[in-house]
Image (cartoon, grey):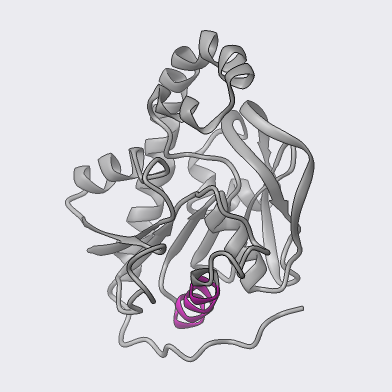
């Protein structure tokens, strides 16, 4: 499969997702939303990763509008989508949900629990019922009206729109201490002592989650031509 991979910064790339895609024999097309313009709609699957930007900053980052439209197009057309952190927030916003600053920023590993729907989900269900995952964000989302909640934790952690678009607030892709560059000195000092052990424990789970998404997308790639008409915005 050809998987379109949207990024929003040089230090927020696909990391473990690259490893999982390579192991399954898939090709990634990296698309930097800051520089590459409107993304193509004809990918077999799409993965959208994090960034230092936020929903509501369209005046500073006008390409966010292109991302919202693309997410509605892909979801309407049935293209499998996996959206992470900022990607999860842009997907939520694209379908009418509120995205706003959290009361307290999140930095580190947090306990997260699958809902009943999450346990039955073909992608999130690849994870244990309870697990610790990495969050590094100041913003969170509310649940889009027609979405299915899949996981909860220090904030809403995962949902699905329809049966082919997944969003996770946490960062399943992290695999190295390079994530420390996202934080200030005080946060790095607090995170660093335990980070390597936590990342070592997380990597098999992250790979399992990505493998489940890629397998679902591979099975779905046998679908016929897709209609790319954007659905109406849900409010």
74 drawn magenta: yes
Residue at the far front: name it: 60
Residue at left offset 47%, top offset 29% = 181
What secondary structure characterizes most of the magenta part? helix
Snapshot quadrant of residue 175: top left
Camera-nearest residue between 148 and 7: 7
In this image, 155 relative to 46: left or right?
right
Report the quarter where the N terminus lies.
Answer: bottom left
- The x and y percentages for residue 195 are 50, 16
Residue at left offset 62%, top offset 72% = 94
Snapshot quadrant of residue 157: top right
Residue at left offset 41%, top offset 19% = 200
- Start and end of the magenta stretch? 65-77
Report the quarter where the C terminus lies.
Answer: bottom right
Snapshot quadrant of residue 19: top left
Q: Is residue 150 above or below residue 1?
A: above
Camera-nearest residue between 20 and 109: 109
- The x and y percentages for residue 154 are 74, 36
- The x and y percentages for residue 97 are 73, 67
Camera-nearest residue between 233 and 159: 233
Q: Is residue 135 above or below residue 63?
A: above
């Amino acid at each position: 499969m050809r998987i379109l991979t949207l990024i929003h910064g040089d230090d927020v790339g696909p990391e473990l997702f690259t490893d999982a895609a390579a192991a399954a024999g898939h090709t990634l097309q990296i698309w930097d939303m800051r520089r590459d313009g409107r993304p193509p709609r004809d990918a077999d699957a799409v993965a959208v990763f994090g960034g230092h930007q936020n929903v509501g900053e369209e005046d500073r980052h006008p390409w966010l509008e292109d991302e919202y439209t693309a997410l509605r197009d892909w979801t309407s057309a049935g293209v499998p989508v996996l959206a992470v952190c900022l990607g999860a927030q842009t997907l939520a916003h694209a379908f009418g949900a509120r995205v706003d600053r959290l009361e307290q920023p999140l930095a580190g590993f947090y306990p997260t629990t699958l809902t009943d729907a999450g346990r039955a989900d073909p992608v999130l269900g690849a994870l244990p019922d309870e697990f610790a995952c990495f969050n590094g964000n100041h913003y969170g989302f509310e649940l889009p009206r027609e979405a299915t909640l899949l996981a909860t934790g220090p904030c809403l952690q995962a949902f699905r729109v329809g049966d082919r678009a997944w969003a996770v607030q946490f960062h399943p892709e992290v695999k190295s201490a390079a994530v420390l560059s996202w934080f200030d000195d005080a946060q790095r000092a607090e995170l660093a002592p335990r980070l390597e052990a936590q990342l070592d424990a997380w990597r098999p789970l992250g790979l399992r989650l990505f493998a489940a998404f890629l397998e679902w997308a591979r099975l779905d790639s046998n679908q016929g031509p897709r209609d790319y008409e954007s659905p109406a915005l849900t409010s």
